[in-house]
Image: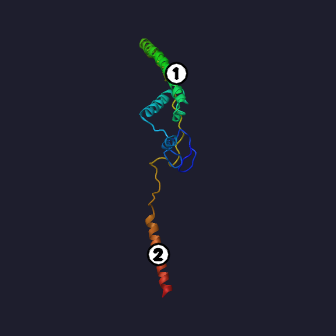
């Protein structure tokens, strides 16, 4: 559908123009000349709901819902029925498998715990006589905090005194030259 405001060609599924944001649903309703009553809105809402449900099995179910065609509604109904049958089958399967798994766990857990407890510690840990601590390399110089390093502020007063003397000599030289 072409937007009457900006002229961009938008797909039928879009409710608003991608460029300017014009309400294309209102434009389509005005062009078709039909007014949506309560039953039409309910029918469309149910189709959207059924399409979202059938989407789990049929990935293309929501496509073409905006067309409001009877054939699409029947197709969605068929897809929803098939999805429901798949759900019933899976529910029945899980309803039988989950209690069976629970029963197997209840029976096998004590035996499995005893088998885990009965395993010797030698299987789980390294033997003590074969253990050797890893060899560490020698530490490099200057890595320890106990070693003395020059401070950032060390000798700053010396540098300040040198700067003050050089400023005094510079001022005296300019005074002599300036007179």
**Image colouring:** rainbow
Q: Is residue 57 visible?
A: no
Residue at 47% across / 84% down in the picture?
175
Residue 67 % position (x, y)? 53, 35
Of the numbered discs in the image, which one, if any, rests on residue 82?
A: 1
Residue at 51% across / 49% down in the picture?
20
Q: Is residue 47 above or below residue 12?
A: above
**Which residue is more in the foreground, 36 or 81?**
36
Label 2 element class: helix
Mark 2 neighbour class, 10 Å CA radius: few under 14, some 14 to 19, many 20 or more: few
CB contact under 8 Å: marks 2 and 1: no
Residue at 51% across / 36% down in the picture?
66
Q: Nearer the viewer, mark 2 or mark 1?
A: 1
The residue pinned by badge 2 equals 167
Residue 69 % position (x, y)? 53, 32
Residue at 53% across / 41% down in the picture?
138
Of the numbered discs in the image, which one, if any, rests on residue 99?
A: none
**Which residue is more in the foreground, 17 or 164?**
17
């Amino acid at each position: 559908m072409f937007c009457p405001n900006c002229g961009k060609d938008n797909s039928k599924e879009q409710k608003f123009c991608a460029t300017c944001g014009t309400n294309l649903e209102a434009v389509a309703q005005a062009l078709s000349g039909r007014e949506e009553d309560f039953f039409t809105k309910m029918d469309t809402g149910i189709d959207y709901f059924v399409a979202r449900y059938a989407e789990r099995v049929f990935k293309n179910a929501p496509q073409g819902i905006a067309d409001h065609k009877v054939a699409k509604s029947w197709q969605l109904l068929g897809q929803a029925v098939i999805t429901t049958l798949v759900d019933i089958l899976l529910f029945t399967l899980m309803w039988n498998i989950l209690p069976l798994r629970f029963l197997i766990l209840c029976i096998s857990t004590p035996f499995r715990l005893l088998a885990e407890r009965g395993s010797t510690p030698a299987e789980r840990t390294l033997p003590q006589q074969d253990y050797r601590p890893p060899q560490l390399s020698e530490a490099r110089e200057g890595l320890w905090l106990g070693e003395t390093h020059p401070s950032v502020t060390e000798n700053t007063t010396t540098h300040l005194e040198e700067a003050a003397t050089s400023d005094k000599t510079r001022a005296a030289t300019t005074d002599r030259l300036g007179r």
